[in-house]
Image: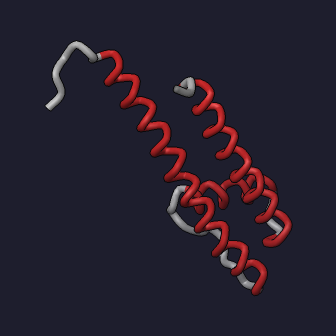
Amino acid sequence: MVKTSTILSWLLLVMIVVLLLGTIGFRQIFGLSWIDSFHNTTMYASGLGPLFEARTKEAKLFSSIYALIGGLTFVAVAAGLIQRILDIELLNDDDETLL
């Protein structure tokens, strides 16, 4: 079985990479400041939607693709964390019967 710390490290690394790529993309394509780019990235990744309007075809394409990738990554990382937390709880409660 893979260690929980290893899996959590990979999940964190994946989320950081996706946030970094989104921030750079919004900075380059939308022309936003670094903080606005990061803010827009986190809003897309968490599913809350855009803060700035995409006016060009490139911006619309990037934001559409990033919304899918960022949202799926956010869900996958959250599911991985929840699974690990539940696994730890179940291992600690091995003497109790489960319903």
Q: Position of residue 20 (x, y in %)?
A: 76, 51
**Most foreground residue, 59 or 96:** 96
**Most foreground residue, 21 or 94:** 94
Q: Position of residue 43 (x, y in %)?
A: 58, 59
Q: Position of residue 38 (x, y in %)?
A: 71, 54
**Most foreground residue, 97 or 63:** 97
- Compared with 55, 9 (above or below) is above
Q: Residue at x 76, y 65 (%)?
A: 26
Q: Residue at x 85, y 66 (%)?
A: 28
Quadrant, the C terminus: top left
- Tell me: 10 left or right of 4: right
Number of marks drawn: 0
- Tell me: 80 left or right of 59: left
Q: Residue at x 77, y 85 (%)?
A: 56
Q: Residue at x 70, y 53 (%)?
A: 18
Q: Position of residue 58 (x, y in %)?
A: 78, 81
- Compared with 83, 34 (above or below) is below
- Compared with 20, 67 (above or below) is below
Q: Going by the picture, which residue comes out furthest to the front?
A: 1
- Compared with 37, 8 (above or below) is above
